[in-house]
């Protein structure tokens, strides 16, 4: 497949294979392409959206980008965020269960890249040691329960726990009504519990959003 972008000719299949090979060599697992964005008018680098073998292209996708810097080629990717996602969500869930009875957590790392030193052989603690940018967007769904104080106060208590654990990023915490919690999953949760829709009041009591700032103010 040849792609012509503003005078630059690309062999799309060759480019995809090259970027996939780079990922597979780094992470020692198979990847599949979703969408290729060749460099051109909008971006000055090649970008490929991928998902891993055994994953879901709608919920487990990552990106790899190829930069041509003179005679040198540089690749960056953010798949490590998918790799450590279960571990990170488990850490969040552990703190939530100190305040609420039943929870589902879905997260997304916002970093465009991680250190090349981090592969599938590494864990969250390795990223922390390398001082990686670990801000996340995370959505938390709390199943209905009788609580002695207000939901707002419970959320404040929870955010304090997050700060002590050095969990950073933007959060959305939803209090779900009886009988609605089991239907929430990673693929549907953004639309299932969606504000300003007719079904929202049937599903959710309240949603509280906020951000736990990263004191280092790093960008990557």
Image (cartoon, helix red, strand yellow):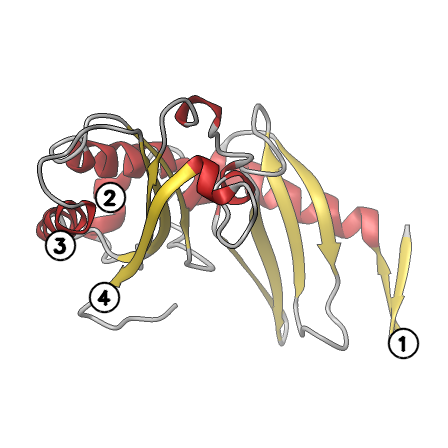
- Distance from the alpha carbon under mark 2 to that under mark 1: 43 Å
Frontmost of labels 3 and 2 is 3
- How far from the left and from the top, in percent, is residue 156? 14, 53
Residue 75 or residue 150, whichever sits in front: 150
Q: Secondary structure at mark 1?
A: loop
Category of crowding for the residue at label 1, using alpha-carbon neighbours closer than 10 angstroms: few (below 14), some (14–19), many (at least 20): few
Q: Quadrant of residue 163?
A: bottom left
Does label 4 or label 2 sit earlier along the sequence?
2
Identify the residue position indicated by label 4 in the image: 213
Identify the residue position indicated by label 2 in the image: 126
Q: Secondary structure at mark 2?
A: helix
Category of crowding for the residue at label 2, using alpha-carbon neighbours closer than 10 angstroms: few (below 14), some (14–19), many (at least 20): some
Identify the residue position indicated by label 3 in the image: 163
Classify 68 as above or below 2.
below
- How far from the left and from the top, in percent, is residue 194? 50, 47
- How far from the left and from the top, in percent, is residue 85? 37, 38
- Asked if the residues shown at circle 4 and circle 2 are in contact, with their CB atoms under 8 angstroms apart, the answer is no
Q: Secondary structure at mark 4?
A: loop
Q: Which mark is residue 7?
A: 1
């Amino acid at each position: 497949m040849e792609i012509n972008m503003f005078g630059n000719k690309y062999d799309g299949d060759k480019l995809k294979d090259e970027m996939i090979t780079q990922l597979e060599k780094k992470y020692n697992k198979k990847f599949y392409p979703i969408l290729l964005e060749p460099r051109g008018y909008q971006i000055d680098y090649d970008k490929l959206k991928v998902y891993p073998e055994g994953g879901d292209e709608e919920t487990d996708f990552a990106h790899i980008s190829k930069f041509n810097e003179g005679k040198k080629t540089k690749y960056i990717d953010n798949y490590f965020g998918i790799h450590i996602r279960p571990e990170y969500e488990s850490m969040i869930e552990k703190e939530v269960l100190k305040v609420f009875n039943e929870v589902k957590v879905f997260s997304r790392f916002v970093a465009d890249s991680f250190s090349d030193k981090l592969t599938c052989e590494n864990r969250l603690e390795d990223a922390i040691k390398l001082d990686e940018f670990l801000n996340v967007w995370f959505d938390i769904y709390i199943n209905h329960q009788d609580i002695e104080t207000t939901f707002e106060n419970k959320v404040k208590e929870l955010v304090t726990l997050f700060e002590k654990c050095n969990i950073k990023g933007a959060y959305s915490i939803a209090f779900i009504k009886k009988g609605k919690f089991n239907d929430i999953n990673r693929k549907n949760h953004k639309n299932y519990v969606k504000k300003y829709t007719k079904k929202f009041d049937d599903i959710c009591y309240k949603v509280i959003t906020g951000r736990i700032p990263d004191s280092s103010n790093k960008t990557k």
